[in-house]
Image (cartoon, grey):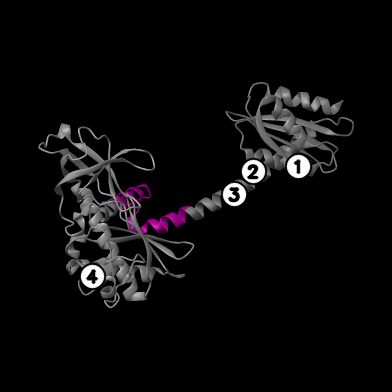
Amino acid sequence: MTERLYYHDSFLYEFDAEVLDLSKSNSDSRSAVILDRTTFYPTSGGQVFDMGWIFPAGTRDASNRLRVAEVIERDDGQILHILENVGPIQKGSRIHGVIDVDRRRDHMQQHSGQHVLSAAFVRLFNLPTVSFHMGAEACSIDLDTKHLTTDQVEAAEALANDVVMENRSVSIRFVTQEEASGLGLRKIPPLERDQLRLIEVHDFDLTACGGTHVSATGEIGCMLLRKTEKTRQGWRVEFVCGKRAVATARHDYSVLAESGDLLSSHIWDIPQQVRKLQEESRASRKSREQLLEEMADLYASRLLAETPDNSGRKIIVRTFPNRDLTFIKLLAQRLTRQNTEVVAFLGVISDHPVLVFAQSSGQPFDMGALMKEVLARRGGRGGGSKDMAQGGSVQVEGLETALRELAAQLRE
């Protein structure tokens, strides 16, 4: 089995090794190598994999290096180093590995920060973490609780950052399962192993973990809790640490500053300004709806007055360029309510033509069937009930002519 160098030293960024075997990933058959020792961390326990490069023995030429795109731990425990291409690497070859230092340091900050944050929720509120996820932009923990308040989140964040600023030591040790049972671990993994690797934040947290970690909490930098959301089994807390926290805070501030400029307001007053805009928008929407209804009433009255009876029935055909669909539907409703003998074929001529067919209650036709008939000839989709139907046509040209031909059929 591959010797996991990162178990003992998370700051070991380069190493020499021998290629034990060439392999393929199970999911997509990418090329991979298995080494006798490695400092590349495979995705496990919520932490994502390291990336970096492998150099054939005896060369440090960038043109000869092979990119390690992913690191996977197989079910049998073997670690696959997925390469973009294997180049001259063969079984038995000696290689020199170099991991992406910035990526490793970021992962160390996030994972160690997670340990501190999870311990803070336990210490303050006895809320255990049931899972941890490290994403490309943010990380999250899932807490086993039905309720989580803003005050609890802020208190846990404050305690976690206090521990960071105290720069407590973070150490690694190995113990047996029996020894671990009496140490008061925050969480013991269910797997039966001869030895457990423990990560200890001095006088604050002790838990089993196989990930890479900082050597002191000050290296986490800082911690920022972003948002919370309810999940099926508890609450999810999103957070970022270290450089991610700084970059996220900078981005948040830039967005807020730009928003403040657009609102001619200080960033602290943005919520008040947004609420004011929402109220104005609701009032404007209500006023617009009222105006549309009044306009539809007036327009319906005019159309009814202009349309002669045909066998005791008024058949109205109208198309409108770029009209609001809401208005067309309101017009159809007003026409059929103001007169009990109305059939209306209305259309909007635009890049995406829309049709609305309606008839007064008690009329003998089927608007839904007529709509499907028209759209079958012109392309599009739609349907509806006996008295009201709506659809979208593909063809713009000849739309009004098609509606008039349909009206002529009803007059026969």
Whether residue 165 is situated above or below residue 290 in the rendered picture: below
Helix, strand or loop at mark 1:
loop
**Can you give x and y, in whole percent of width and height, for residue 320 in the image?**
65, 30
Residue under label 3: 287
Q: CA distance from mark 2 to mark 1?
A: 24 Å
Q: CA distance from mark 3 to mark 4?
A: 72 Å
Q: Closer to the camera, 131 or 327?
A: 131
Residue under label 1: 385
Task: State which region is magenta.
Answer: 251-277
Q: Do callouts 3 and 2 mark residues in contact (Cβ within 8 Å)?
A: no
Label 3 packing within 10 angstroms: few (<14), some (14-19), many (20+): few
- Looking at numbered disc 4 in the image, what kind of residue is underneath it? Val
Q: Which mark is residue 208?
A: none
Label 1 packing within 10 angstroms: few (<14), some (14-19), many (20+): some
Helix, strand or loop at mark 4:
strand
Give whichever of discs 1 and 4 has the lower sequence position.
Answer: 4
Q: Is residue 301 left or right of residue 277?
A: right
Q: Quadrant of residue 90?
A: top left
Give whichever of discs 3 and 2 has the lower sequence position.
Answer: 3
- Looking at numbered disc 2 in the image, what kind of residue is underneath it? Leu
Residue under label 2: 292
At a point 16% along the width and 46% down the height, the residue shown is 17
Eye-nearest disc, 1 or 4: 4
**Can you give x and y, in whole percent of width and height, for residue 230 in the image?**
46, 62
Residue under label 4: 175
Residue 96 visible in the snapshot = yes
Q: Closer to the camera, 51 or 3?
A: 3
- Looking at numbered disc 3 in the image, what kind of residue is underneath it? Ser
Label 4 packing within 10 angstroms: few (<14), some (14-19), many (20+): some
Eye-nearest disc, 2 or 1: 1
